[in-house]
Image (cartoon, rainbow, N blue to C red):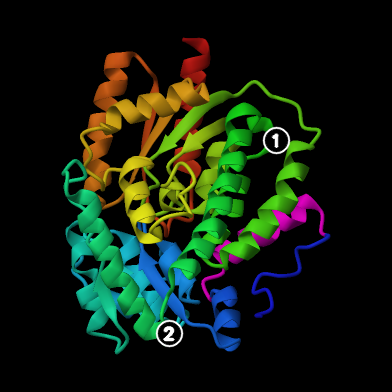
């Protein structure tokens, strides 16, 4: 049994644990991944937004969420055109600069750029680089069977890397671990919605996001330790506007930007790293586990600009998210050069205008280091709400 790759937080004060999460999240050398490899483990890197990490986990691999980093894409710039979002370049840069070493990489055709990412990646590395084709038509009667077959293909590829067969019992054990993780994350988000003064948005983000770079069992252990301590905080509510943050489904805003927003608002819900919370209920552990995962992706899932499901119109889902969290305003963001995000930004703001709901519009880039303009604009937006 491998030693923990994220250690040293046990028996520390809550604020120090959250500080360690933030430090790990901002460390572009990914020390937990290095420790995993030093112990003989293999790593599967997967691009945003959603990936069935249970399959990699069942094969004994560490599923690593490739979400870019605040680094200069010196080598990756030569592999891409100019007008692309930062996350594409910095994710590849992590591999080219050997900050992260993978045994397999998987991308998804969520946009034109991501559709070509696995090919570009594969030209630079000898390990398998694949595309996982999630259903383009989620409403088709054949979507579940199609995805089941695609997951089967992925499982066979992972077995070749793992050097062993992945059994149904392996998958059921992994599904159980990830079910527990999603339950804990739902509990974390319940604190944000119901008592947001106990947990700032940047703290919640750091506690959640480290799950994408450590084994889920370790993440579960940490969340089970800190959630009761968060709930027991003696903090009192302040007079702040409750907002929903929308636009963090793929490229992630800098943690300091989230912290800036949290200093003047209560972020009661968001779509940050939505792939970690994509499945909204437990995946069944009985029956065929791959079929359970495929069904859950389509039938027990959240929404995103990169999934087209007529049952989940994104504008209506945003309104539902706001009502369920008691939000009085929305922060509608998009990463620079993000075609899906910028398109939805127009649709979201149009719907919010129709509903008479106030909103703040902004763009971000993971390399941002100065947030003074956002802070000033947000303060003006809040003042206008308070004195309107």
Residue 152, quarter of picture = bottom left
Disc number for residue 164: 2
> Alpha-carbon distance for marks 1 and 2?
45 Å
Residue that appears at 65% across and 80% down: 2
Given this view, does label 1 or label 2 mark the residue nearer the observer?
Answer: 2
**Can you tell which quarter of the image residue 348 is in?**
top left
Please indicate, yes or no, whether residue 280 appears anywhere in the rendered image: yes
26 part of magenta stretch:
yes
Query: Which one is nearer the viewer's eye here, 197 or 373?
Result: 197
Q: Residue, x 46% and y 78% (percent of image)?
A: 43
**Residue drawn at x 59%, y 76% as measured from the top left:** 31
User: 334 or 284, which is in the foreground?
Assistant: 284
Question: In which image quadrant can residue 191 be found?
Answer: top right
Q: Quadrant of the N terminus?
A: bottom right
> Residue 348: which disc?
none
Question: x and y percent of residue 73 in the render?
Answer: 35, 73
When the figure is inspected, residue 114 is found, relative to residue 298, above or below; the finding is: below
Q: Is residue 331 above or below residue 163?
A: above
- Tag 2 secondary structure: loop
**Between discs 1 and 2, the one toward the N terminus:** 2
Position in image of residue 167 (x %, y %): 44, 73
**Left or right of 164 on screen, residue 291:** left
Residue at which label 1 appears: 198
- In the image, the segment drawn in magenta is 12-29
């Amino acid at each position: 049994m491998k030693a923990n790759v994220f250690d040293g937080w046990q028996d520390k004060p809550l604020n120090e644990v959250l500080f360690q999460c933030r430090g790990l999240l901002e460390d572009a050398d990914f020390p937990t991944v290095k420790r995993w490899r030093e112990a003989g483990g293999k790593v599967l890197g997967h691009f945003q937004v959603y990936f069935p990490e249970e399959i990699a986990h069942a094969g004994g691999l560490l599923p690593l969420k490739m979400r870019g980093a605040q680094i200069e894409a010196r080598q990756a710039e030569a592999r891409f055109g100019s007008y692309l979002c930062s996350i594409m370049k910095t994710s590849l840069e992590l591999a080219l600069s050997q900050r992260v070493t993978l045994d397999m990489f998987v991308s998804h055709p969520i946009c034109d750029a991501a559709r070509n990412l696995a090919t570009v990646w594969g030209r630079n590395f000898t390990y398998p680089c694949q595309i996982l084709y999630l259903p383009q038509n989620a409403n088709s009667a054949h979507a579940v069977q199609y995805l089941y077959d695609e997951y089967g293909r992925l499982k066979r590829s992972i077995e070749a890397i793992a050097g062993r067969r992945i059994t149904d019992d392996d998958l059921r054990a992994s599904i159980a671990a990830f079910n527990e993780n999603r339950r804990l994350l739902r509990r974390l988000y319940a604190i944000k919605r119901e008592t947001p003064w106990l947990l700032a948005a940047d703290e919640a983000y750091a506690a959640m996001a480290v799950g994408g770079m450590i084994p889920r069992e370790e993440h579960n252990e940490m969340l089970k330790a800190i959630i009761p301590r968060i709930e027991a905080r003696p903090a009192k509510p302040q007079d702040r506007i409750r907002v929903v943050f929308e636009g963090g489904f793929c490229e992630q805003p800098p943690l300091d930007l989230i912290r800036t927003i949290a200093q003047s608002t209560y972020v009661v819900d968001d779509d940050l790293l939505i792939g970690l919370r994509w499945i909204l209920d437990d995946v069944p552990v009985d029956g065929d586990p791959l079929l359970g995962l495929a069904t859950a992706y389509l039938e027990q899932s959240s929404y995103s600009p990169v999934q087209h499901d007529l049952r989940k119109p994104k504008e209506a889902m945003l309104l539902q998210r706001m009502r369920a969290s008691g939000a009085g305003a929305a922060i509608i963001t998009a990463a620079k050069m993000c075609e899906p995000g910028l398109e939805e930004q127009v649709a979201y703001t149009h719907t919010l205008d129709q509903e008479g709901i106030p909103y703040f519009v902004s763009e971000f880039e993971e390399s941002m280091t100065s947030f003074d303009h956002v802070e000033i604009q947000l303060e003006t937006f809040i003042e206008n709400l308070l004195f309107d």
